[in-house]
Image (cartoon, rainbow, N blue to C red):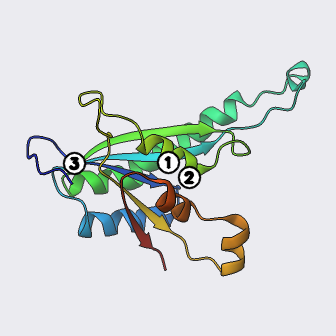
Amino acid sequence: MSTNNSRRRRVLLPVDITSSSEEMCAWACENFFRPSDIVTVLSVAKKQIVPHGSSYFGLSHDHSEAEAVLHAQEWIETHIKPRLEKCGCGVEVIVKLLETDKHHVAEAIIEESKRVDENENSRYKFEAIVLASHKRGAIKEFFLGSVANYVLHHANIAVVVQRMK
């Protein structure tokens, strides 16, 4: 973590629009975040895959994609942002739209975490990632993978994982 008091600590907080994200945010406010932190809340909305030639039949997924982004933004504004502001953190919201067959949610988190601070070219924008890990059985974990596990193994910054009940 930065020891320079003039620079506010920046933390990436990925959420999945569930009650687990709310619980994880509450835990982080109580145990990790400092009032001077700037928290970037990241949500990944699923981009609709449009079959080739579907535009000829008047099929469009633009409306549902816009709804997915709007739903994620509204959920964050209602459930996460007020809690972060209450614990004194500055809040930024990012909703990414990805085709889930080509991009994994965890890769989107890693990509965002590797952004470089515009003011300090050699430094990552974020000092840490705080995310939840959902308890699944070992078989589901093996076949489906784990976002938290991927982030732990691929991040270049500190990662805090809150194990959910």
The label shown at residue 109 is: 1
Question: Where in the figure is residue 159, as x and y percent of width and height?
Answer: 38, 60
Q: Is residue 43 visible from the viewing direction of this image?
A: no
What's under tag 2, amino acid-wise?
Ala
Query: Do residues under tags 2 and 1 come within 8 Å of each other at their CB atoms?
Result: yes
Q: Is residue 29 visible from the viewing direction of this image?
A: yes
- The first of marks 1 and 3 along the sequence is 3
What's under tag 1, amino acid-wise?
Ile
Q: Residue at x 51, y 63 (%)?
A: 148
The foreground one among 21 and 118 is 118
124 in relation to 106, above or below = above
Tell me the SS state at disc 2.
helix
Quarter of the image with the N terminus is bottom left
What's under tag 3, amino acid-wise?
Arg
Mark 1 nearby-residue class (10 Å; few <14, some 14–19, many ≥20): many
Q: Quadrant of residue 128?
A: bottom left
Distance between mark 3 and mark 2 Cα atoms:
22 Å
Q: Residue furthest top?
A: 56
Residue indicated by mark 3: 9
Residue indicated by mark 2: 106
Tell me the SS state at disc 3.
loop
Question: Where in the figure is residue 157, as x and y percent of width and height?
Answer: 36, 53
Distance between mark 2 and mark 1 Cα atoms:
5 Å
Q: Residue furthest front?
A: 122
Mark 2 nearby-residue class (10 Å; few <14, some 14–19, many ≥20): many
